[in-house]
Amino acid sequence: MSAQHLSQALQRIEASPTTAMTDRASELRAEGRDIISLSVGEPDFDTPLHVIAAAKAALDAGDTRYTPVTGTTRLKEAAALHFRRDLGIAAEARDVIVTAGGKQAIFEALVATVSPGDEVIVPSPWWVSYPQMVRFAGGTVVPLRTSASDGFRFRPSELEALITPRTNWLLLNSPGNPTGAVFSADMLRGIGEVLRRHPQVLVLSDDIYAPLRYSDEPHAALAALCPDLAERIITVSGVSKSHAMTGFRIGVATGPDWLISAMGKLQSNSSGNPASISQAAAVAAFEGPQDFLADWRDAFRRRRDMVAARINATPGLSTPVPDGAFYCLVDAAPLMEPFGGDDGKLALHLLDNGVATVAASAFGGRDGFRISFAADEAVLDTALDRIEKALS
Ligand code: GLU
């Protein structure tokens, strides 16, 4: 098919680089190549048994039909519990929408509200799909650049300097992908003060990595800290990252009624309800035992320490030690010459050497690559050996 058939909206976007690299790694593996994939953010732990049991029970009970488009009441109640218990957000079931992964919630929120000419402030480095979704909706991406020296966090004044009368969203992601940056409660309160001066700005707070923080501070969520702004904050969460349920495709979001309804309208005309079996499994994830999350977090912390230490001991590579999530954004600036300054070529070189990563430029960064350390320590160790050798 020729490009002339493609809509203008589609022509403004590219395929997701994270999923493209992961698909490529799977293809190479299927061809018999020995590839370690550190390209996608997907916990390697087994999905908890009580979640699997709930999915099986749903199948056995004949739970195999349409559910309400925006999710079952049962799951909305469980998700509201999650928002209250884990994020401190005063959510009720009626304020929740259930989507096919957090990704769909973000897509719907943006497509439901962004019109051509609207400006969306996206802190960079960003998760790959944020700018694509904004462009698809016809909006203009306004990057809010952050750097490793600031821990990839921006100051309220830097945010305010970018706000114009056309700004309609700020995208927040803490803990962040791909940097692992975490905003403290004080930082978020400072952001809240700026937002109070600019009532046209909505906030999408992507808190999907909330359980994956490596300090003992409780998770800080903007909607919990600034309840007076609740009418313009949507908070996105889910079970994919926290409960190793990426394939179930369940995301949840809570926000003002007008926006949740608008998202539901879109969903009713596109995917319809999220999978019934997955919804039953997600109820078990939110309502079942949560104590294993602390063990998983400890395992991620050990991996993080190991990966960051090895990267920082490799000549030409450096990374801050991330405070949350399971990614390291690695700077390889001193090693870029053989790749003509193109970190896409660097990522392909690493792939040729048996490790799939994603180029920093895919995240609005440069001269580096992202590693997901959601793999076991022995695998990470081998991957780091390969990276070291490939770049020596
Ligand atoms: N969010 C994950 C990542 O960044 C999953 C892949 C994706 O949807 O981008 O790797």
Image (cartoon, grey):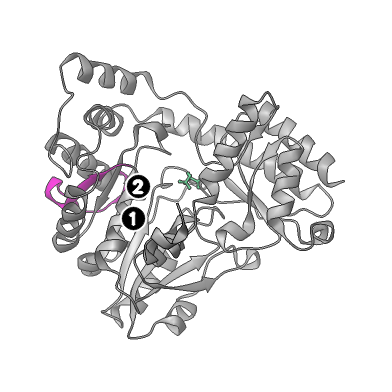
Residue lying at 34% horizontally and 43% vertically, measured from the top left: 101
Mark 2, residue position: 102
Examine the rendered structure and indicate whether residue 35 appears above or below residue 325.
above
Classify mark 1: helix, strand or loop.
helix
Relative image position of residue 122 (x, y in whole percent): 45, 68
- Residue 223 in picture, x, y percent from top left: 28, 61
Cα separation between marks 2 and 1 = 6 Å
- 232 relative to 49 in the view: left or right: left
For the point 37% across and 72% down, the residue is: 139
Q: Is residue 326 visible?
A: no
> Quarter of the image holding residue 159?
bottom left
Q: Which residue appears farthest toward the top when viewing the image? A: 60
Image position of 140 with respect to 216: above or below? below
Magenta segment: does it hold 377? no
Disc 2 within 8 angstroms of ligand 1 (CB): no
Q: The disc labelled 1 sits on which kind of residue? A: Ile
Q: Say few, some or many: other residues with alpha carbon within 10 Å of mark 2 (under 14 / 14 to 19 / 20 or more).
A: many
Q: Which residues are magenta?
A: 86-100
Residue 373: x and y in percent read 60, 39
Q: Is residue 87 magenta?
A: yes
Q: Amino acid at mark 2?
A: Gly
Q: Residues within 10 Å of mark 1 (few under 14, many from 20)?
A: many
Q: Nearer the viewer, residue 318 or 120?
A: 120
Mark 1 — residue?
A: 106
Whether residue 7 is situated above or below residue 158 in the rendered picture: above
